[in-house]
Amino acid sequence: MAILVTGGAGYIGSHMVYALTDAGEDVVVLDNLSTGFEWAMPKGTRLAVGDTGDPQLVSKVIAENNVTDIIHFAASIVVPDSVADPLGYYRNNTVNSRNMLECAVKGGVKNFIFSSTAAVYGDTDKVPIAEDDPVRPMSPYGSSKLMTEIMLRDAAAAHGFSYVILRYFNVAGADPKGRTGQSTKGATHLIKVAVETALGRRSKMDVFGTDYATPDGTCVRDYIHVTDLALAHSDALAHLRDGGASGTFNCGYSHGYSVLEVINTVKRVSGVNFKVDTAGRRPGDPPQIVAGSQRIRETLDWQPQYDDLGTIVTHALAWEKKLMTMRN
């Protein structure tokens, strides 16, 4: 009985692999290493290098490792890139996920946990937003994830396996023990970019859009610590193993921070007053999106430990410093 983690060498996936390994679970990872790193996972982690769209490879990994549970992270995740390359996103996020589902059905997998996104909601006036509110994605990225949600629900109904869909809000921070963090070069996550700028890795950073209908004109997001997100997956897996019903859950803290608030927090924590420029809006960015998290707290008994922006930034900054020493 093993858990297959796709994208387990990536940012969120590596935190999940550590959480599962810490809990004594048997883990196998499938990752093509396009944005992930083998060193980001615990030593000795079983790794199959390849694509989630390869049916022969996926079926082999499931059969040879007696996989009973799948946690599916592997995906392309940059909203502006999805606008420029929609077909690439539909291939990697939707078509490849369809292959994962088919292989899971044929391999007798019992539980499937899917990494989805708040981008499925699109532009909404409701704050916070609940899981049953309308979904109107504004980007191919959001649409590609929503399509997979639909496939997953339909496949589970037809073939009798259980699932949890976790809709992530803005993931940030790093492992409090300093074992892994956001390591992809050129990453676009706001806190990642800000700490890189604070440490001199970038000469400046840009704020995209200052004319939104928000308190300071910049976008507002719900930032969730990556360790709390990994905990949500562990809670989801325990829920399904105990016979809990399939479902969809938001992963966020139910409060948001603006882009400028985040930047000011990074400046305060780092002690560096780095350069910030303003630029026009990016396509596909809703003004504000904040999670309604009542369902996950009540149903999965999820109890986050790092709901503090200063803590999230502190861990991200510490990881970035470590990453600089590793790369020098």
Image (cartoon, grey):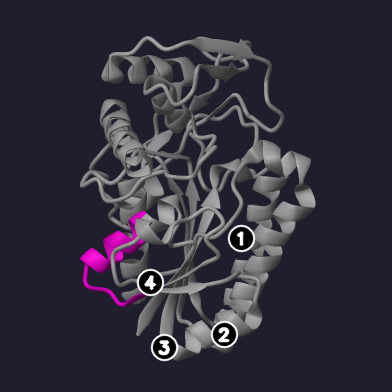
Q: Secondary structure at mark 3?
A: loop
Q: Which mark is residue 240?
A: 4
Magenta stretch bounds: 15-28
Q: Which mark is residue 303?
A: none
Q: CA distance from mark 2 to mark 4?
A: 22 Å
Q: Amino acid at mark 2?
A: Ser
**Residue 26 is a magenta residue:** yes
Q: Residues within 10 Å of mark 4 (few under 14, many from 20)?
A: many
Q: Earlier in the sequence, mark 2 or mark 4?
A: 2
Name the residue: 45% across, 90% down. 64
Q: CA distance from mark 2 to mark 3?
A: 10 Å
Q: Are marks 4 and 3 in contact (CB under 8 Å)?
A: no
Q: Secondary structure at mark 2?
A: helix
Q: Earlier in the sequence, mark 1 or mark 3?
A: 3
**Mark 1 or mark 2: which is in front?**
2
Q: Amino acid at mark 3?
A: Asn
Q: Are marks 2 and 4 in contact (CB under 8 Å)?
A: no
**Mark 2 or mark 4: which is in front?**
2
Q: Residues within 10 Å of mark 3 (few under 14, many from 20)?
A: some
Q: Earlier in the sequence, mark 1 or mark 4?
A: 1
Q: Secondary structure at mark 1?
A: helix
Name the residue: 68% across, 54% down. 144
User: Disc 1 designates what residue?
Assistant: 149
Q: Where does residue 217 sit, x and y in percent of width and height?
A: 56, 11
Look at the picture and state if 60 lies above or below 147. Answer: below
Q: Secondary structure at mark 4?
A: helix
Q: Earlier in the sequence, mark 4 or mark 3?
A: 3
State the residue in front, 185 or 290. 185
Look at the picture and state if 111 lies above or below 186. Answer: below
